[in-house]
Image (cartoon, rainbow, N blue to C red):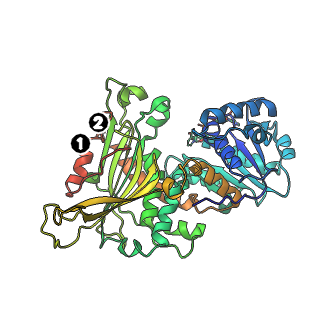
Amino acid sequence: MVSRIIPVEDFDLVIFGATGDLAHRKILPGLYRRYVAGQIPGTAQIIGAARTQQDDAAFRAEAREAIRKFANKGDDLSQLDDFLNHLGYVAVDARGEGGWDELKSRVRPGVVHAFYFSVAPSLFGDIAQRLADNGIADADSRIVVEKPFGRDLASARELNAVLARHFVEQQIYRIDHYLGKETVQNLMAVRFANMLFEPLWNAQYVDHVQITVAETVGVGGRGEYYDHSGAMRDMVQNHLMQLLCLIAMEPPYHFDPNAVRDEKLKVIRALEPLEPGDIVRGQYQADSDGPGYLQDVGNADSRTESFVALKVRIANWRWTGTPFYLRTGKKLRARTSEIVVTFKAPPHSIFDTENEPRSNQLVIKLQPNEGMDLTVMIKEPGPGGMRLVQVPLDMSFADALGADGTDMPDAYERLIMDVIRGNQTLFMRGDEVEAAWAWTDPIIADWEAGSKRPEPYDAGSSGPEEALRLLHRDNRRWREIRS
Ligand code: NAP
């Protein structure tokens, strides 16, 4: 199977924060890969903007280094010079007046205009205001904003209000890069383009769902930021809740941005408040390889969690009775993101065998390698009588696409091309973000008001013992964390 590349319309993309880490690590390399794939028209412009005073040539040299450094293994770098010819740079300060006239003169009329706000959220309002005041953005322009989208409901509302002064919702693309993964879209295809799963996709047949996002790294150089955030704000409120929504939502009437986002919003609104026994929080401890969380953030009294596990219930007809277990943390055994849908066991076994039929599981792997596995019971091959064995029906996309998977666009590439196409399906709508904060806010407020410390856990483990017990109490087990 060969993937088809459909070029996008001609565009000017302005990247505010083009000298920063995200631009270097993800945005510029991603755009280069789409250029090599033939998706970016030969007339498109990518204009870097930040305070650093430099000219086009210096920015191109910076971009060259960044793309070389952060290219994927196996990327073809032979078109780098051609690509760099599409890059320009204008020095602007989000809070100053210099440079905006020049930016206006660079942006061409009659093509798609996208403005990527790859800067701190505190600058969103200033940039939006200056784009409007200087007549650079118009009613067809698109803006792209990054996480974190607020740190609670009040700040998310404030950010939404700041952007709404100059842009309508159809112009705002809030990135959650988990939604740009091939598997996430495939999850929707598997659910809604097949008869096989949807009839079973409810509390009658699904025993429980697990969503795990595990990292092996600690907080590293982001200690101060992270200590004001924690796993709940940094990962659950956005990435894990978005995945939960896609698993749990009703079929939208059409694969259309608002229809999909309406259904996701209904899931968030149906989440039950958590009971204290449904929550486990943890902090990784020091080991011979490195410091513990408290040393990493330089705050011996910190009560911020580097791990959280939750038992979440959705109060609606489809899901009442099926718990969703969510966990995410740092310094865990392996780097992996996956969703496991465990179906109920067959009600009765007709086989007189030592291996009873086990539950089918659909494992949706988001990283490190994207793909899906469906485990089924079969007869163990051979002449030894009727013995059962569980085997995976493997559907790794690399194999399915007949390539080694390297030409599959990564999440940022796909999402930026969606911005140019004007397709908001894989972006969070303002009311979704606010609803997610409205659910997480009281949970975090309880922690902050209480004196309970997160449970310590060993670096390289699966998290605190208490997180294992969260499932054991329900006679269930987490799927082992492995990459
Ligand atoms: P960063 O490395 O600190 O870069 C910030 C960028 O903003 C720089 O290019 C800086 O350039 C520019 N900037 C700062 N003040 C400015 C001003 N007054 N006017 C114009 N430009 C200004 O940050 P980052 O890691 O790239 O992150 C950017 C945004 O993406 C943040 O909101 C972050 O939370 C989010 N994000 C980042 C990542 C990641 O992997 N890095 C992942 C997810 C989300 P000058 O100093 O030249 O002005």
Question: At 61% from the left edge and 43% from the top edge, which residue is drawn?
Answer: 121
Question: Which of the two discs, 2 and 1, labels the residue nearer the N terminus?
Answer: 2
Q: Quadrant of ligand 1?
A: top right
Circle 1: element type: helix
Q: Residues within 10 Å of mark 1 (few under 14, many from 20)?
A: some
Q: How far across and how far down the image is residue 140, in percent? A: 76, 60
Up the image or down, 281 lies above or below 156; here it is above
Instruction: Give the residue drawn at x 67%, y 49%.
Output: 34
Q: Would you say 6 lies left or right of 386 here?
A: right
Q: Left or right: 93 with respect to 72?
A: right
Residue 457 appears in the figure: yes
- Answer yes or no: do the residues labelled 2 and 1 have beta carbons within 8 Å? yes
The residue type indicated by label 1 comes to Glu
Q: How far apart are the two marked residues, 2 and 1, measured between alpha carbons? A: 8 Å
Residue placed most toward the observer, 139 or 415 = 415
| x, y percent for residue 211 | 38, 54
The residue to which callout 2 is attached is: 457
Q: Would you identify the image quadrant in which residue 260 lies?
A: bottom right
Q: Which residue is mark 1?
A: 465
